């Protein structure tokens, strides 16, 4: 992830956002997606002494966090290993393949985002979607998707 700076030609104001660049394998070219909208540079300078340096560091930390979450441990089996004499001869590795698919499909992130929105709504029943976005850092589309979900569904 990186800090994206866009300057409006008419007003001359610079807008900051955190974006993620990636290569679209199907279309064959690189593109980016906005992860978090930050605001105009002149307004952010009132809150931070150096907003560019601050949010560059935030983007770097978000990248490191995403890399840690993306890492899936592998399972290593020693085919020459012998089972102890008193064992029943079974090893439970059946869930390993399912867990790998679960993470590759992003279901863990999907369910975690839903839970974050639900938890925020329970803690802040009068809050708006914009406040949820600022507090959680989730994408507005994700917040809209889970905003009106009934409890125990």
Image: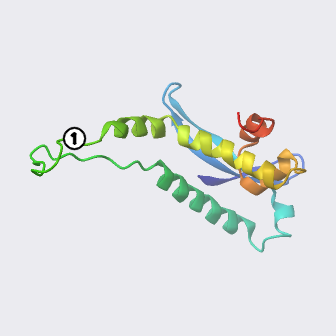
Is residue 15 visible in the rendered image? The answer is no
Relative to residue 49, is residue 3 depicted above or below?
Answer: above
Is residue 25 visible in the rendered image? The answer is yes
Residue identified by numbered label 1? 90
Task: Check the picture and name the quadrant holding the C terminus.
Answer: top right
- Classify residue 42 as left or right of residue 59: right
**Which is nearer the eye, 87 or 66?**
87
- Classify residue 80 as left or right of residue 119: left
**Which is nearer the eye, 74 or 25?**
74
- Classify residue 20 as left or right of residue 11: left
Q: Quadrant of residue 50?
A: bottom right
> Residue 51 in the image: x percent, y percent?
74, 66
Residue at the spot x=13%, y=48% of the render? 83
Residue at the spot x=82%, y=68% of the render? 45
Residue at the spot x=65%, y=41% of the render? 33
Residue at the spot x=88%, y=51% of the render? 127
């Amino acid at each position: 992830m990186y800090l994206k700076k866009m300057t409006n030609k008419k007003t001359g104001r610079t807008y900051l956002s955190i974006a993620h660049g990636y290569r679209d394998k199907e279309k064959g070219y690189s593109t980016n997606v906005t992860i978090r909208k930050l605001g105009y540079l002149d307004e952010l300078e009132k809150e931070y002494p150096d907003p560019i340096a601050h949010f560059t560091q935030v983007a770097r930390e978000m990248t490191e966090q995403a890399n840690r979450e993306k890492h899936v441990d592998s399972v290593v089996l020693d085919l020459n290993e012998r089972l102890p004499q008193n064992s029943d001869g079974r090893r439970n590795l059946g869930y390993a393949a399912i867990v790998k698919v679960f993470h590759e499909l992003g279901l863990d992130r999907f369910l975690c985002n839903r839970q974050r929105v639900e938890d925020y709504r329970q803690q802040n029943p009068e809050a708006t979607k914009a406040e949820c976005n600022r507090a959680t850092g989730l994408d507005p589309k994700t917040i809209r998707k889970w905003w009106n979900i009934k409890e125990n569904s």
